[in-house]
Amino acid sequence: MRANAIPSMAAGWRLPNLWDAVAFVCVIGVLVGFGHVAEGTLVPINAPGATQISLDPIHLPEYAVRTTLRMFAALAASLLFTFTYGTAAAKSRRAALVLVPVLDVLQSVPILGFLTFTVVFFMGLFPGQVMGLELAAIFAIFTSQAWNMAFSIYQSLQTVPNDLKECATSFHLTGWQKFWRLEVPFAMPGLVWNTMMSMSGGWFFVVASEAVTVGDHSWKLPGIGSYVAEALDKRDIAAVVYAIVTMLLVILAYDQLLFRPLVAWSAKFRFETTAGATASDPWMLRLVRRTRLLKVVGTAIGDAAVWVGGLRLSLGGAPAQRRRPPSRTVDVIYGAVLAVIVAWALWKVIVFASAALAWSDVRTALVLGVFTLVRVTVLMVIASLVWVPIGVWLGLRPVWARRAQPIAQFLAAFPANLLFPPFVLFIVYFHLDPDIWLTPLMVLGTQWYILFNVVAGAAAFPGDLREAASNFRIGGLLWWRKVIVPGILPYYITGAITASGGSWNAAIVSEVASWGNTHLHAHGLGAYIADATDKGDMARVVLGVVVMSAFVVLFNRLLWRPLYGYAQRRFTL
């Protein structure tokens, strides 16, 4: 057989193949769609069709593209926020004193609260332009994605095994190298699953972000969310079904094209010393590997990332062995400055609200907050009992996790507004109490954070520990108590923190349900804020947001933070 005279040249300079052509067509299609949608953001608000919604299904593909691009723009901003804010909170003890409570507050502020204040700001940046509304919608979606991802990387950086840290110190890695070569890979499995959850969380609130109503002003950006809002207003069941089918197709598309390859890629960062259970590579990943041109481009990008991650930058910190103990004097000064800032901010809120509110309004908001707190607590318990066992089962079986992945994403993305018609008709027909029967709508924003985080924790559970438990024949309740629950507890608590905050957010769209001329209200803080937003009552919006934030922060400080500290001390590998 005749040998190739120049094997290296043959391997390095191959012509593009059929798979490169397929990939090229897909990339060009995405760029053309992006350009077409971008044209609609640079027109005046009063331009024909700029903020008008048609229920003709022929417009749904365009609406789907615009909504998806808004969500990916928000996702890019969320990733930037995650790698800066979450890392700073995990790396700096003093910064964590501020950043973690602020993150608790931010995740508790309802999306309508953000829209009420940010629409005016973004409209001021682009007066009379659709771009202002687009940025407001993207920011609103960002607020439903970023907090969960920031908590994920914060939890991962706090639970890096000590032996891996010692190994990085032994190799004299700088702070920059340690971050990109140890901490980010360790955090990657959980971050990928939480990114999927954040994407679905954006769908959950897409109706509120695209159909914006503040006071006497109302805008509807072309998108699936505003299409759903228009269909609900006109009681068009067929249009609602069209929207659900379109949303399902979009979720299946980006699951197949993006998240399945990402999950398969992140599996190589699992922390284990023995080979664990794996599933076959998804078809999209195999297709990319068959291309020639894309492999060259991907290799070049990977080499560049390796080079950047290998730069010997200190990242502002001294090595652990030379780090001085924290100064008590600096801590006292730092705490005093924070106390002054908090007192000043609280005084400003009181001055703003006192002009239009009385103490009876505060008492009303607190009582309604207790009602919502009871709903959140009950749903958290139910969701934990249901989804922790299911999440563990899926996480330990990658094949089944991959099968359930798109289903879970679709169910997590399902907006509560789409369930208003059956719930309203059911409650009215049987004369039921809205305070009880509207509550299940809140679970749509609760359970999936727990499921996705538990799946990520079980998937990252070391295979050698599973084998050790199997060799010692540990099973039944003892296996749950001594093996798997300690292994997934940090992940579960991260999911529970974001789930509780998400539930308070979900109260905004769950405690008020409408179908045609029938309007149902449950007693709770979510209904209070929604009603104040519809009336343009800024003082009561501020009051509701402050009370909701206070409830979430107290709930986190009294329950989840102590549990998180316990898990970090006792169950970090």
Image (tube, rainbow, N blue to C red):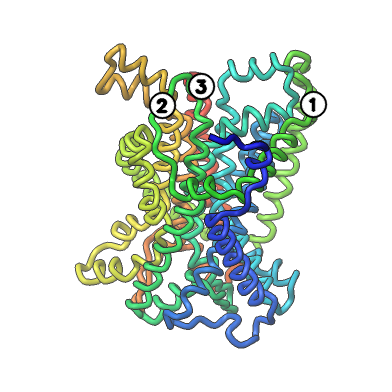
Question: Where does residue 111 sit, x and y in percent of width and height?
Answer: 55, 59
The reply to whether residue 136 is visible in this rendering is: yes
State which tag comes first along the sequence, 1 or 2: 2
Residue drawn at (32%, 77%) of the image: 237
Residue drawn at (74%, 43%) of the image: 341
Q: Which of marks 3 and 1 is in front?
A: 3
Return the residue found at the far front: 1
Q: Could you say which is closer to the camera, residue 83 or residue 382? A: 83
Question: Where does residue 272 sit, x and y in percent of width and height?
Answer: 48, 22
Mark 3 falls on what kind of element?
A: loop
Q: What residue type is labelled 3?
A: Thr
Residue drawn at (50%, 69%) of the image: 64
The residue at which mark 1 appears reads as: 330
Q: Is residue 90 above or below residue 35?
A: above
Residue 276: which numbered mark, if any? 2
Mark 1 falls on what kind of element?
A: helix
Cα separation between marks 3 and 2:
20 Å
Residue 572: which numbered mark, if any? 3
Mark 2 falls on what kind of element?
A: loop
Left/right placement of residue 295 relative to residue 495 reads: right
Left/right placement of residue 432 relative to residue 235 reads: left
Q: Could you say which is closer to the camera, residue 438 or residue 182? A: 182
Q: Could you say which is closer to the camera, residue 394 or residue 88? A: 394
The reply to whether residue 358 is visible in this rendering is: no
Return the residue found at the far bottom: 48
Left/right placement of residue 257 relative to residue 244 reads: right
Cα separation between marks 3 and 1:
30 Å
Residue drawn at (54%, 69%) of the image: 210
State which tag comes first along the sequence, 3 or 1: 1
